[in-house]
Amino acid sequence: MLIKELKAEGLNHTYAITVSKEDLADKLEAKIKEMQPQVSLKGFRPGKVPVSHIRKMYGQGIMKDVVEETINETTQKAINDNSIRPAGQPKVDLKADGDKVTSGSSDLEYELSIESIPDFTPVDPEKLKFTRLKHEPAAEDLAAEVAKLGEGQKSYKKKAKTAKAKKGDAVLIDFIGTVDGEAFEGGTMDGHQLVLGSGTFIPGFEDQLIGSKAGDELEVNVTFPEPYQAENLAGKDAVFSTKVIEVQAEKEAIIDDEFAQKFGLADLEALKVAVEEQYKSQLDNQSRMKLKRAILDELDKKHKFDLPPQMVEAEFSNIWTQVQSEKEAGKLDEDDSKKTDKQLEKDYRKIAQRRVRLGLVLAEMGQKHEIQITNDELQQAMVAEARQYPGQEQQVIEFYQKNPQAIAQLRAPIYEEKVVDLIVEKSTLTDKKVSKEILFEEDDMI
């Protein structure tokens, strides 16, 4: 076996690897002898088929396995001998004729290209300082949270027949929708309750019912948006023949023991306790998210090293696929929708680079501080994921058990959180009380 370095530029390494046909022949003989006791052919006793006969019948097929195993072994040897930490799957470029190699008439020759993880020393977490934003809920905050529950349990009561509908009222309506004079599927409904101003109907529909009263019959003219989930209606003008059955005013919820019992709680006091616990948990989670963002920003700032191009490209490809999908569905956020593809690509490539850099830093810090993921932690994550698919829990768990790559995707966020916990524990942390508005203020994505 001969391993010769052809190129070492930055994180890219290329080697020429040669394994002689004689070495391959020896490996083939060893493989056949290993198989011999299990080979069963007509005319021979089980396990007694001559090596020469097995070679004649199956030699070239077995040699394909030998070549594959040899490539894997020599690749690993090149990695180990040169102390390389691969950043991805090494690339193999076969230089010899494959048929000649498997027939035993040619040496195995190939070029091995490896992209390595950069060598760097991660920052000492004990030298880092962070400010953790905290918001202590006041009595009025908790009262507002309880009131929100009331808003979510809205009910409506009938208004006088002469009362005109206004924004915030509900109307009980019958309607038949037509496009080009023809009724369409899903466009007819009786006794539908529509809250005016809710934005649940086609743009413009609700506005045209403001000022109507019980008994009114009117034609509502709208245009279906482009795009629209029903493609046959997208961008089409439609007319809805609508009859107003009833106008209803919002009925304010009474927050009392009976209201609390709708949530499965004994009384109003128990509801307030539950709301307080949930609200404090929400504030703690937001505080943690803000702190984690500050930690990641600081790690990104503290580390500058060459990034493996293949890793960056793979990460960017995943991001870009999602961006294009959102663009086609008309779901890009307002800022992104104003940018050209060239501008978007530049921005999201920066995000890909940041993610790769932070991934490498977190991995290195975790390794240095011997962070481990236990089987119990993986099992809990697997069960949590399975619960998102009621009725299919067992299939989801079996999927993870059979797919190492899927397990790796479960492992990554657990590992990341553990490294963040390590940094929180070892760094200098100062708590700062802030308003709820500041705590929930959105951060820039890049």
Image (cartoon, helix red, strand yellow):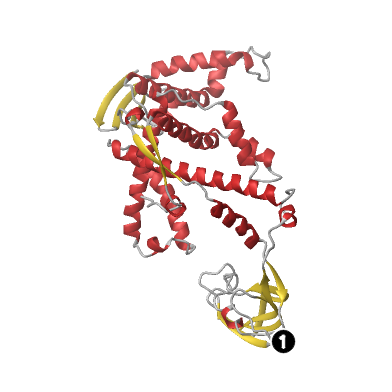
Q: Nearer the viewer, residue 263 or 195?
A: 263
- The reply to whether residue 325 is in sight is yes
Image coords of residue 391 (percent x, y): 71, 45
Image coords of residue 418 (percent x, y): 47, 31
| Point 66% across, 77% down: residue | 184
Image coords of residue 31 (percent x, y): 52, 16
- Residue 386 sits in which quadrant? top right
Q: Residues within 10 Å of mark 1 (few under 14, many from 20)?
A: some
- 171 above or below 67? below
Secondary structure type for disc 1:
loop
- 335 above or below 15? below
Residue denoted by label 1: 215
Which quarter of the figure is the N terminus placed in? top left
Farthest front residue?
139
- Residue 10 sits in which quadrant? top left
- Viewed as shown, does residue 305 lie left or right of 179? left
| Point 52% across, 22% down: residue | 59
- The reply to whether residue 311 is in sight is no
- The mark tally for this picture is 1
Q: Nearer the viewer, residue 215 or 357?
A: 215
Image coords of residue 387 (percent x, y): 65, 42
| Point 50% across, 13% down: residue | 30
Q: Amino acid at mark 1?
A: Gly
- Residue 214 sits in which quadrant? bottom right
Q: Nearer the viewer, residue 363 or 418?
A: 418
- Viewed as shown, does residue 15 lie left or right of 363? left
- 217 above or below 329? below
- Viewed as shown, does residue 61 lie left or right of 357? right
Q: Nearer the viewer, residue 209 or 130?
A: 130
